[in-house]
Image (cartoon, rainbow, N blue to C red):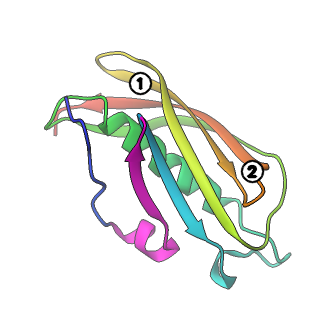
Amino acid sequence: MTDEWTAPEFGLKAALGFALENRDGRSIAVLEISGVHLNPNGVVHGAVPFTMMDTAMGGAVMNTIDDGRRCATIEMQTRYHRPVATGTLTATAEVITAGRRVVHLRAETRDDDDRLVASATASFAVFEP
């Protein structure tokens, strides 16, 4: 089992510009909001917290499975609670239950004032590459 999985750099993560780290048994994505993250209404586009939570949940899965295995999102239900336009977003993900082939997770994204911006639950498949 991997103790400290380190997320590789990949295109979408780099394009959005968020950092991903693992601490205290959770996977955490952090993003400084800029103009590229805003929709035409001047608030963060919903795809931004969605992607941050999806990626953080993938990191949480990678922390629980055996080395050499991989994961992919099966399904994800996302709820948006409030708009945000400036500051920092922090998405935190944790495993609810982990089976051999499917892992269930929850995640939330919060703003600088620790207000809930978005939340999600998801199921991830675990497989051999």
Q: Is residue 84 left or right of residue 127?
A: right
Q: Amino acid at mark 2?
A: Asp
Q: CA distance from mark 2 to mark 1?
A: 27 Å
The residue drawn where x is 38% and y is 22% is 102
Q: Amino acid at mark 1?
A: Val
Residue 39 in picture, x, y percent from top left: 76, 74
Q: Nearer the viewer, residue 2 or 8?
A: 2
Q: Quadrant of residue 20?
A: bottom left
Q: Is residue 65 left or right of residue 83?
A: left
Give the total of numbered labels: 2
Mark 1, Cα crowd under 10 Å, few <14 / some 14-19 / many 20+, is: many
Q: Is residue 65 left or right of residue 67?
A: right
Q: Label 1's element? A: strand
Tell me whether circle 2 and circle 1 mark residues in contact (CB < 8 Å): no
State the mark number for residue 94. Answer: none
| In magenta segment, residue 21 | yes
Between circles 2 and 1, the one closer to the viewer is 2
Mark 2, Cα crowd under 10 Å, few <14 / some 14-19 / many 20+, is: few
The residue drawn where x is 43% and y is 66% is 13
Residue 33 in picture, x, y percent from top left: 65, 74
| Vertical order, 16 against 74 (above or below) | below
Q: Quadrant of residue 100?
A: top left
Q: Which residue is mark 1?
A: 103
Q: Earlier in the sequence, mark 2 or mark 1?
A: 1
Q: Which residue is mark 2?
A: 114
Residue 16 in picture, x, y percent from top left: 52, 72
Residue found at the far bottom of this picture: 35
Q: Label 2's element? A: loop
Magenta-drawn segment: 10-24
Residue 15 in picture, x, y percent from top left: 46, 76
Q: Is residue 108 left or right of residue 10?
A: right
